[in-house]
Amino acid sequence: MAILEVKDLKKSFDNQEILKGISFEMEKGQTLSILGSSGSGKTTLLRCLNFLETPDAGTISVNGNLLFDGAVGHEKGVDLREKRLHFGMVFQQFNLFPQYTALENVTLAPKLEANGKSDEEIIELGKELLVKMGLEDRMNNYPHQLSGGQQQRVAIARALALKPDILCFDEPTSALDPELTGEVLKVIKELADQHTTMIIVTHEIGFARDVSDEIIFMDNGVIADKGTPSQLIDNPSNERTRQFLANYLK
Amino acid sequence: MFANVTLSLLEGFLGTLKLFILTLLLSLPLGLLISFGSMNKNPIVRLPIRFIIWVVRGTPLMLQLLIIFYGPGIFFGMNFWGSGDTGRFTAALVAFVINYACYFSEIFRGGIQSIPKGQYEAAAVLGLTKGQTFFKIVLLQVVKRIVPPISNEVITLVKDTSLARVIAFYEIIWEGERFIKSAGIIWPLFYTGAFYLVFSGVLTLLFGYIEKKLDYFK
Ligand SMILES: Nc1ncnc2c1ncn2[C@@H]1O[C@H](COP(=O)(O)OP(=O)(O)OP(=O)(O)O)[C@@H](O)[C@H]1O
Ligand SMILES: [Mg+2]
């Protein structure tokens, strides 16, 4: 069964349709990348999955459970928060909490969630995640003491700490200096190798080719093309995809 | 003589201090409430509150003191504040609390609105409730940002308490002035300045300390 099934998702802002019926599925342990030119709706799609925006229509199901149905809308409160935890989100701008150390950023939400785990266990898990991100000697630093690449890796650890079914990345390296993108892409690649289920919006086409099981090309609010990296990037058959790649290579 | 004057002025300073402390204790929480009102999505709540803030910030505190103290008697013919010092004190306190709550509310509003949207979104995707988001994420960041402007207001308040003299509220300048009539000397009045200076100096140090304490994050 697909871990995620999105059907005919629609979203408008100010009477302008930004997502015009997005449907796709993905399997557990897979990495899905989303490419597309600026304004094509990639961020909006991720925000709908994380319920930062409420879709106007369509359905979202995780592990066969219907999480959202546009015909019904969202119920408020606890329910929405629980549904949200199926997804993790890594933002372009990191959005770390400045008054907390790296480790506290990672452990804050699990501690508040309090699903039977002791604080010690949660701290152990947090340290483990930060070690995995290569930040063993940065755990007690505050965000402003960290480089952009380090901050983004803390943000990834923070999202992983809640063990989401699907981890979403919105251009995780776009806010970074070029020499810092490598360290972030490296940990994402490691996560992919360990079969973390991920959706990655990126402009790093080379990276998408290396890391993805499947790539979606979005254009103007629809999925214009879809395929494995070799189909979509190395041998694009779709005219729009070709144009996009040609522009990128220039 | 000097010791006598100092003691008298200290007594007057107690009046100043009482007005100062009670104004702060009441206007800070009231200001927070007003700031929520002024950010309310519903214009029926927001607009009247913004209007009141505009009136209060747009007119002199001295005028507000006079209107609040004499207004009820003049317009409604009633002795609302009662007679004597307690009445004067209450009227002064009400005027100061309203005035300062409005100023503080604008500082709070600025502080709350300066928190980037990304902080709320990061909290939301981590499953935090609205309450957790405010208390665990937003509040301390707001506090850090508003300490300098609040500190300015508080030091202004120290000096503004002297305005309460217009409704014959007993405070330190009143006491200082008394010596002109009773002993024909003017230096006690000037000497009151030293009390204000020492007190605002202490407050400056205190706020500097708080700012420093919050320096550990950016
Ligand atoms: N909250 C909003 N209100 C109004 N319009 C919005 C809102 N969010 C997004 N849009 C519009 O939706 C369109 C798609 O935006 P989106 O951010 O999803 O694009 P994107 O594919 O992520 O682009 P980029 O590559 O530049 O990040 C844009 O035209 C944008 O102006
Ligand atoms: Mg985007």
Image (spheres, coloured by chain):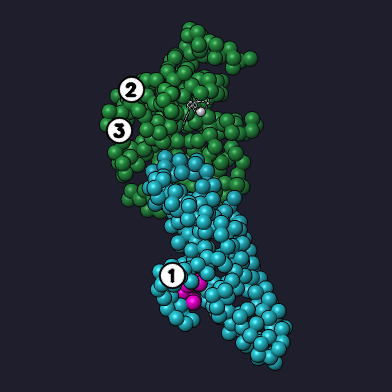
Chain colours: A green, B cyan
Q: Image height check: is A146 above or below A57? A: below
Q: Note whether ligand 1 is within 8 Å of mark 1.
A: no
Identify the mark at residue B189; answer none if there is no mark: none
Q: Residue at (48%, 59%) from the top-left corner?
A: B31
- The kind of residue on which mark 1 rests is Pro
- The kind of residue on which mark 3 rests is Gly
Cα–Cα span, label 3 and label 2: 15 Å
Q: Secondary structure at mark 3?
A: loop
Identify the mark at residue A7; answer none if there is no mark: 2
Give, as a single range, the part of the protein colored magenta. Answer: B88-95
Q: Image height check: is B62 above or below A80? A: below
Cα–Cα span, label 1 and label 3: 53 Å
Q: Residue at (49%, 38%) from the top-left corner?
A: A156
Image mark 3: chain: A
Q: Which residue is mark 3?
A: A73
> How far from the left and from the top, in percent, is residue A179?
65, 32
